[in-house]
């Protein structure tokens, strides 16, 4: 069974590859390694797939990644049957892990050869730029180094373990335009100044952080370091209708203010902005005076 061919054939996946868990461990804390072994006792390989989500530059106050259906659900629906197929056919245990995962997913994607990491710390797909989510299958299947299959059809051998981490045009536009100057060396993000983190955070904000939030128009997430990147110019829209249909570009006070947490969850189920509840969204709307 060639798992990469199966992954690549799925609607919604642009690129697929596999990296060795042993190598990925070099980028993980002891705790993250321990958690991974709890998911998959004899973890050996990590299958990595990229999922394009760009749905256009439309006005709105939600980050592009959160406008369509919740990516956790979308990716899980695609990867779970494949993970089950691996379990059935090989007898080796496999688990689907997305985002809320002990695996450092951008490093896994880089080591699997499916994309390159830019200075903003994000993985870039050959065609869809950085507007791709990463989904993984952690498995006990023995690791064999094989070429990744990229969105442009190329079969590329993954980089060696000592290859450079950041591999982009180094124009520094992402760093220059980041309002919080949150992008450091090797794509490391300083969350205290990152607008993506601040808008999604429930914790109390300092005056400086409030000032930062007022500098951009989003109430959930941040797209600046992706928008200004020349590698993201003219990226095509995703073909995945779950990221293009029924999209919500903006939320207003009226949409959410009188909802209990339960009502909010029901009204906006399967959305990536729902998990923290309405409070951070209401706080951000209020701060920005986007009251009505
Ligand atoms: C926490 C988190 C955030 C935090 C912190 C981001 C960060 N980069 O640290 C916040 C809320 C800010 C955030 C924001 C965003 N996120 Co986020 N996030 C994550 C999450 C859950 C964990 C990332 C993480 O572990 N960070 C903390 C530490 C461990 O990472 P680090 O400091 O960069 O450390 C690495 C480097 O230092 C590197 N390294 C570099 N040099 C060296 C040298 C040595 C010797 C070693 C050992 C390691 C090393 O290795 C470390 C491990 O990767 C991942 C999913 C996952 N499980 O990976 C998604 C993920 C990275 N996010 C994602 C997205 C889409 C976003 C946003 C675009 C959302 C938005 N529009 O607002 C922004 C982008 C901001 C940005 N430029 O990163 C996607 C990225 C997809 C892609 N194309 O790359 C991911 C992969 C989720 C997914 N499944 O698709 N995110």
Image (spheres, rainbow, N blue to C red):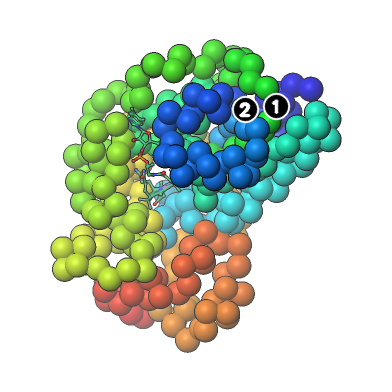
Rendered location of residue 2, percent (x, y)? 74, 21
Residue at 70 percent of width and 37 percent of height? 94
- Residue carrying label 1: 141
Judge whether 146 appears above or below 26 on screen: above
Contact check, label 1 and label 2, Cβ < 8 Å: yes
260 displayed left or right of 287 = right
- The residue that appears at 57% across and 73% down in the rendered structure is 265
Which corner quadrant of the figure contains ligand 1? top left
Q: Quadrant of residue 96?
A: top right
Residue at the spot of label 2 = 44
Compare residues 19 and 3 and report the one nearer the observer.
Answer: 19
Residue at 62% of width from left, 27% of height from top? 44
| Element at label 2 | loop
Q: Give the quarter of the figure containing the N terminus.
A: top right
Whole-percent x, y for residue 108 in the image: 50, 31
Residue 27 in sight here: yes
């Amino acid at each position: 069974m060639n798992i990469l061919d199966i992954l690549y054939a799925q609607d919604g996946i642009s690129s697929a590859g596999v990296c060795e868990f042993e190598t990925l461990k070099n980028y993980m804390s002891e705790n993250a390694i321990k958690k991974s072994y709890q998911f998959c006792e004899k973890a050996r390989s990590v299958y990595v797939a990229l999922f394009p989500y760009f749905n256009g530059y439309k006005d709105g106050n939600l980050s592009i990644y959160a406008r369509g259906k919740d990516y956790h659900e979308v990716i899980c629906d695609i990867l779970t049957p494949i993970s089950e197929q691996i379990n059935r056919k090989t007898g080796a245990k496999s688990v689907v892990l997305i985002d809320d995962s002990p695996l450092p997913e951008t490093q896994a994607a880089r080591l699997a050869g499916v994309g390159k990491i830019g200075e903003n710390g994000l993985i870039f797909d050959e065609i869809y730029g950085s507007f791709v989510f990463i989904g993984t299958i952690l498995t006990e299947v023995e690791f064999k180094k094989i070429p990744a299959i990229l969105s442009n059809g190329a079969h590329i051998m993954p980089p060696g373990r000592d290859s450079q981490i950041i591999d982009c045009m180094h124009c520094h536009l992402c760093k220059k335009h980041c309002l919080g100057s949150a992008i450091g060396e090797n794509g490391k993000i300083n969350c205290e100044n990152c607008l993506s983190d601040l808008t999604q955070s429930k914790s109390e904000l300092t005056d400086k952080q409030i000032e930062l939030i007022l500098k951009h128009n989003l109430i959930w997430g941040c797209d600046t370091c992706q928008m200004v990147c020349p590698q993201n110019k003219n990226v095509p829209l995703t073909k995945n209708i779950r990221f293009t249909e029924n999209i919500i570009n903006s939320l207003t006070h009226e949409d959410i203010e009188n909802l209990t947490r339960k009502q909010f969850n029901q009204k906006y189920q399967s959305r990536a902005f729902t998990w923290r509840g309405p409070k951070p969204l209401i706080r951000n709307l209020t701060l920005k005076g986007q009251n009505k």
